[in-house]
Image (spheres, rainbow, N blue to C red):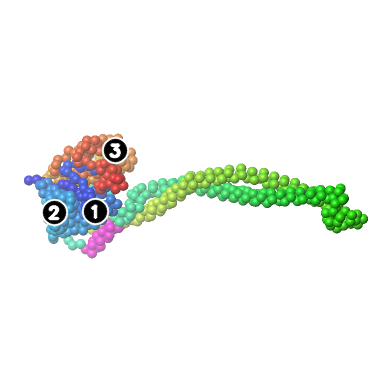
């Protein structure tokens, strides 16, 4: 008889106007690797969503136009079925066979919420396929029990990139009130025995109900506050360091910004001065042109007047010399000239007056010529100066446009972004302080609750030491197979509900080593169940287990100088067919793994498989 278990075969998105987006899986090792932001983690999120996880799915641009999801699954006894769900969430439909395209039949409807009283829900349906239906697990220290849900199992076999580095036990999801049931599910997988036989010792009193209610509320507040902190600025331990870096960056940016603004003011002032000088020079040149035009006309008038006056003087001289002519002034005939009396036009006086006027005009002509010469000299100087002013102005304007202002704008933008980020970090630090206060209050309540229950039924429902030791031995075997540094001793701490590796709590390692040891925990759980013939979902999905090769916390967390990655993949590639493991990684696996038909690279470009969804049209066209 085949062992019960599931193998994920296909994940497909369908839409009325979009081509199907599909990814295939096989038994054994499956690897999805490649560029960031191509949909690798989205694959894990969607599989979890299709196994009853709460929505909504991440609203990534590539998902627009798709409205249905198909998850094709095959049991280890070769039964095949496909789950269909709307991308918006809600109930499921299940169909016989493996489907990756439109399904015409109605299918069987399954509710999304687990119910122990009904079987027409996804959880009960999946549990029946792995032989874990109708099981019960311990819910609290009074030995109250609850119906096993497939979601209790999913959190142990589907580990996303946030959970894989969490600084807590793999059996804890950050909700204190759920820790007891999480351990009970782990015990069920290791021993094959559920908690149906447990009998609750006594009813909870009002005080205990109050504490449990407070603990549940505090867990919700802690989870919400922790999510807000992560969304705002990242892990709490990095916030103070981040704030110090931001303050240093702000000081540097402020200094650079003050220099840039001073330079901008200086060059702007220089541009204004050049504009003023150019405008003054241009106005003066226009004024000189107008004056020269008027002075040239005046010079012509002067010349005409001199010529006229000289003509008068010359005519008077001729009249005096030629007496036998009619008087040019009164017209009297020569015989009627009266030289003894003065006539109205005294020729000598006229000649003198004309000569005197000529002298005055010639003086003015000389002054006018000097003025015109000065103006011409000034005009030539301005004509030479204006092009230089224009060149200087253009150079300053280009400097402002191409260098000074872009630098200033970039610095202002960077400074503004840093101010906003500092505000976020300060807000996050306030939330961290609130988070620590909530955690302290929860721990105090937890101690009070444990003290109140310590005498009720000690040791009931706890994980057997023999199973925990055997599990820890298997984890050590896997870590050695992976060439984990100095893997010599591993034991399972029943109180901490976590592994202790070489005498050091697993949670005390850096995030990279926490990721690889969480992967060992998950792989060991599946292997243990197969070796001991206990029930297991049959698959495990891990996101970013080799984080030490990409983002180590420090020297002690850095595995880049080791061959752990090679042996990690070699071990997983050799797992028997009754197991399926899906690895999602940003780092590139060894060549032998890349050549496997179950290895898929998301390239992020049109040169290969773009990502989970097809490449946008602009990349294809």
Q: How far is mark 1 from mark 3, CA to CA?
A: 46 Å
**Label 2 vs 3, first from the N-terminus:** 2
Residue placed at 20% from the left, 41% from the top?
598
Queried whether the magenta region covers residue 272, the answer comes back as: no
Q: How far is mark 2 from mark 3, CA to CA?
A: 45 Å
Left or right of 91? Residue 305 is: right
Dividing the picture into quadrants, the one containing residue 581 is top left
Quadrant location of the C terminus in the rendered image: top left
What kind of element bears circle 3?
Answer: loop
Q: Is residue 1 visible?
A: yes
Left or right of 208? Residue 198 is: left
Residue 95 disc label: 2
Left or right of 355? Residue 279 is: left
What kind of element bears circle 2?
Answer: strand
Residue 559 disc label: 3
Residue placed at 25% from the left, 48% from the top?
613
Q: Nearer the viewer, residue 502 or 189?
A: 189
Q: Which residue is mark 1?
A: 17
Question: How far from the left and from the top, in percent, is residue 72?
Answer: 16, 49
Q: Nearer the viewer, residue 470 or 167?
A: 167
Dot 2, how many residues are within 10 Å of its Cα: few (below 14), some (14-19), or many (20+)? some
**Label 1 vs 3, first from the N-terminus:** 1
Dot 3, how many residues are within 10 Å of its Cα: few (below 14), some (14-19), or many (20+)? many
Dividing the picture into quadrants, the one containing residue 556 is top left
Q: How far is mark 1 from mark 2, CA to CA?
A: 23 Å
Magenta segment boundaries in residue numbering: 205-221
């Amino acid at each position: 008889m085949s062992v019960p278990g599931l193998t994920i075969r296909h994940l497909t998105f369908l839409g009325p106007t979009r081509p199907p987006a599909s990814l295939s899986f096989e038994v054994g090792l499956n690897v999805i690797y490649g560029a960031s932001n191509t949909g690798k983690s989205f694959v894990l999120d969607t599989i979890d969503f299709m196994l009853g996880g709460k929505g909504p799915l991440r609203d990534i641009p590539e998902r627009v136009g798709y409205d249905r999801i198909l998850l094709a699954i095959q049991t280890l006894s070769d039964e095949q079925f496909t789950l269909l769900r709307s991308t918006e969430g809600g109930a499921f439909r299940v169909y016989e066979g493996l489907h990756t395209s439109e399904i015409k039949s109605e299918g069987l409807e399954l509710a999304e919420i687990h119910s122990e009283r009904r079987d027409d829900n996804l959880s009960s349906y999946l549990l029946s396929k792995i032989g874990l239906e109708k099981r019960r697990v311990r819910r609290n220290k009074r030995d109250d029990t609850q119906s096993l849900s497939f979601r209790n199992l999913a959190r142990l076999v589907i580990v996303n990139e946030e959970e894989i580095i969490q600084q807590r036990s793999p059996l804890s999801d950050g909700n204190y009130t759920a820790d007891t049931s999480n351990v009970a599910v782990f015990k069920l997988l290791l021993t094959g025995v559920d908690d149906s036989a447990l009998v609750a010792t006594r009813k909870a009193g009002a005080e205990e109900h109050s504490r449990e209610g407070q603990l549940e509320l505090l867990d919700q507040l802690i989870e919400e506050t922790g999510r807000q902190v992560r969304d705002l600025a990242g892990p709490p331990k990095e916030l103070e360091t981040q704030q110090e870096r931001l303050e240093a960056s702000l000081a540097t940016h402020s200094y650079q910004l003050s220099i840039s603004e001073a330079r901008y003011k200086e060059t702007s002032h220089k541009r204004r001065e050049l504009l003023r000088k150019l405008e003054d020079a241009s106005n003066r040149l226009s004024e000189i042109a107008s004056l020269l035009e008027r002075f040239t006309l005046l010079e012509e008038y002067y010349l005409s007047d001199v010529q006229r006056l000289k003509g008068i003087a010359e005519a008077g001289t001729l009249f005096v010399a030629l007496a036998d002519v009619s008087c040019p002034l009164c017209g009297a005939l020569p015989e009627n000239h009266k030289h003894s009396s003065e006539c109205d036009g005294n020729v000598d006086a006229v000649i003198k007056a004309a000569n005197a006027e000529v002298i005055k005009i010639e003086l003015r002509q000389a002054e006018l010529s000097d003025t015109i010469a000065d103006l011409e000299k000034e005009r030539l100087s301005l004509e030479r100066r204006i092009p230089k002013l224009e060149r200087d102005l253009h150079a300053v304007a280009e400097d402002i446009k191409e260098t000074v202002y872009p630098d200033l704008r970039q610095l202002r933008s960077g400074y503004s972004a840093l101010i906003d980020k500092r505000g976020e970090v300060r807000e996050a630090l306030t939330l961290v302080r609130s988070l620590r206060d909530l955690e302290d209050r929860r721990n105090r309540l937890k101690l009070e609750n444990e003290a109140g229950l310590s005498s009720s039924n000690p040791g009931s429902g706890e994980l057997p030491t023999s199973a925990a030791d055997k599990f820890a031995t298997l984890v050590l075997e896997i870590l050695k197979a992976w060439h984990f540094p100095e893997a010599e001793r591993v034991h399972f701490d029943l109180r901490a509900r976590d592994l202790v590796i070489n005498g050091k709590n697993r949670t005390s390692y850096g995030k990279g080593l926490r990721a690889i040891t969480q992967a060992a925990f998950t792989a060991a759980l599946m292997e243990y169940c197969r070796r001991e013939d206990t029930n297991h979902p049959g698959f495990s999905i891990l996101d970013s287990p080799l984080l030490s090769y990409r983002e180590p916390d420090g020297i002690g967390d850095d595995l880049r100088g080791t061959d752990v990655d090679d042996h990690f993949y070699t071990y997983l590639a050799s797992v028997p067919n009754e197991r399926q493991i899906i690895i999602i990684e940003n780092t590139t696996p060894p060549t032998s793994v890349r050549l496997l038909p179950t290895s898929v690279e998301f390239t992020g470009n049109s040169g290969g498989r773009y990502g989970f969804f097809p490449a946008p049209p602009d990349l294809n066209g």
